């Protein structure tokens, strides 16, 4: 089992009595650990994807920038939507013209109203004059009836012309309002193509540039909570059965080689990568004050499996061929039975005593 380098501060590596070329077994606490390596990611790490196909119209953020929930990240221009917007604008202009008194429909209907009104007034005058003549017995009853009938007809036509004008004006006004509403709806829907941040955090990567063609589900921006990190580790499939959530983890990071960080296993992904023969394990990361971390930083880890107190141990460099130990004053190496091991020491279950002196 591989062990993490430079974690001696954690695993109680108080040494055996040794002078370089020889040593003596001692009893001490020893910790078994599973080695893993991985990358750091902010908790809540989130990749923003495009919702529609189109072209990147604008990028509002840069890597390293802090953002708040609801802040715009990227806008994507959809050609189909732009065509619909242009069509809607044209429709509004046409509907506005049609609803205007000077539009072709209402101006034509207004002419009909004016003509019907002129006929109505003329026939009204004629009917009044004919009625006066009939009272003076200067015209026949038939002419009076004809004049009255023509007056009623022109009156009815005038009324219908006014009603037709009014109903068409109202219809065109409704069509104009509908066109405006449609344009407003399409304009409002453009905000759906302005991709917004879903959390407070920091931008870790901006993938596209202005003018890039993107499809639905194309990754655009990576953001995360920069105040909290987790580590995604790759654990050898032979060790995965030893792990469970809640187990303590200690880390070493290249950027802070003199520091040791702590966490616990938070999730074990139940899947083995057939190429690497490893499983993914997520673990929390306790961030120390003054430490600046970045997404994607490399981490080495020891996942602590078990501890044993008062174990008989010797330094690992005194064990040869897996389980052979040379002893001072003996020609043949002695075979030992090993227990758990950590970075520097191996537990000896059988084959040595505290009085033996292993040599290199």
Image (cartoon, grey):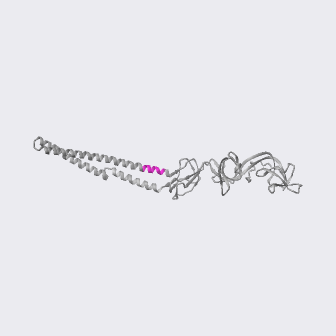
Please state, as top left, top right, bottom left or bottom right, where the C terminus lies in the image.
Answer: bottom right
Q: Position of residue 207 (x, y in %)?
A: 56, 56
Q: Would you say residue 142 is visible in this rendering? A: yes
Query: Front-most of 39 and 215?
Result: 215
Q: Is residue 184 in the magenta section?
A: yes
Extreme-top residue of the structure: 135
The majority secondary structure of the magenta stretch comes to helix
The spot of residue 224 in percent (x, y) is 59, 49
Foreground of the two, 66 or 102: 102
Residue 165 picture location, percent across and down = 29, 47
**237 shown above or below 133:** below
Q: Is residue 292 visible?
A: no
Residue 295 lies in the magenta-colored region:
no
Image point (14%, 44%), residue name: 144
Q: Quadrant of residue 309?
A: top right
In the figure, is residue 236 to the left or right of 135? right
Residue in the image at 44% along x and 51% along y: 186
Judged left or right of residue 55, residue 260 is right
Residue 319 in the image: x percent, y percent? 81, 55
Residue that lies at the very extreme toward the right in this rendered image: 329
Q: Is residue 117 left or right of residue 312?
A: left
In this rendering, is residue 133 above or below 276? Answer: above
What is the residue that sits farthest to the bottom in this orientation? 212
What is the magenta range?
A: 183-191
Number of callouts: 0
């Amino acid at each position: 089992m591989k062990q993490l380098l430079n974690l001696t501060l954690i695993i109680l590596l108080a040494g055996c009595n040794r002078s370089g070329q020889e040593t003596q077994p001692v009893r001490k606490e020893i910790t078994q650990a599973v080695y893993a390596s991985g990358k750091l990611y902010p908790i809540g790490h989130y990749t923003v994807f495009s919702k529609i196909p189109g072209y990147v119209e604008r990028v509002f953020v840069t890597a390293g920038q802090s953002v708040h929930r609801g802040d715009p990240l990227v806008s994507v221009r959809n050609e189909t939507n732009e065509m619909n917007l242009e069509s809607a604008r044209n429709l509004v202009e046409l509907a506005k013209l049609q609803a205007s008194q000077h539009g072709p429909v209402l101006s034509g209907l207004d002419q009909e109203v004016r003509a019907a009104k002129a006929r109505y007034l003329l026939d009204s005058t004629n009917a009044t004059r004919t009625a006066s003549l009939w009272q003076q017995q200067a015209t026949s009853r038939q002419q009076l009836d004809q004049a009255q009938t023509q007056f009623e007809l022109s009156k009815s036509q005038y009324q219908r012309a006014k009603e037709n004008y009014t109903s068409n004006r109202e219809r065109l006004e409704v069509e104009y309002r509908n066109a405006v509403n449609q344009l407003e709806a399409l304009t409002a829907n453009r905000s759906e193509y302005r991709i917004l941040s879903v959390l407070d955090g920091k931008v870790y990567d901006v993938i596209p540039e202005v003018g890039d063609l993107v499809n639905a589900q194309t990754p655009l921006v990576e953001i995360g909570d920069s105040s909290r990190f987790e580590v995604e580790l790759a654990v050898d499939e032979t060790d995965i059965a030893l792990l469970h959530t809640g187990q303590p983890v200690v880390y070493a990071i290249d950027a802070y080689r003199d520091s040791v960080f702590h966490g616990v296993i938070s999730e074990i992904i139940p899947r083995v990568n057939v190429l690497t023969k490893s499983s993914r394990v997520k673990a929390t990361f306790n961030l120390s004050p003054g430490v600046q971390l970045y997404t994607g930083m490399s981490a080495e880890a020891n996942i602590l499996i078990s501890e044993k107190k008062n174990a008989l141990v010797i330094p690992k460099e005194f064990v040869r061929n897996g389980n052979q130990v040379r002893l001072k004053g003996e020609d043949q190496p002695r075979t030992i039975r090993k227990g758990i091991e950590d970075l520097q020491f191996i537990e000896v279950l059988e084959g040595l005593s505290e009085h033996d002196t292993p040599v290199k």
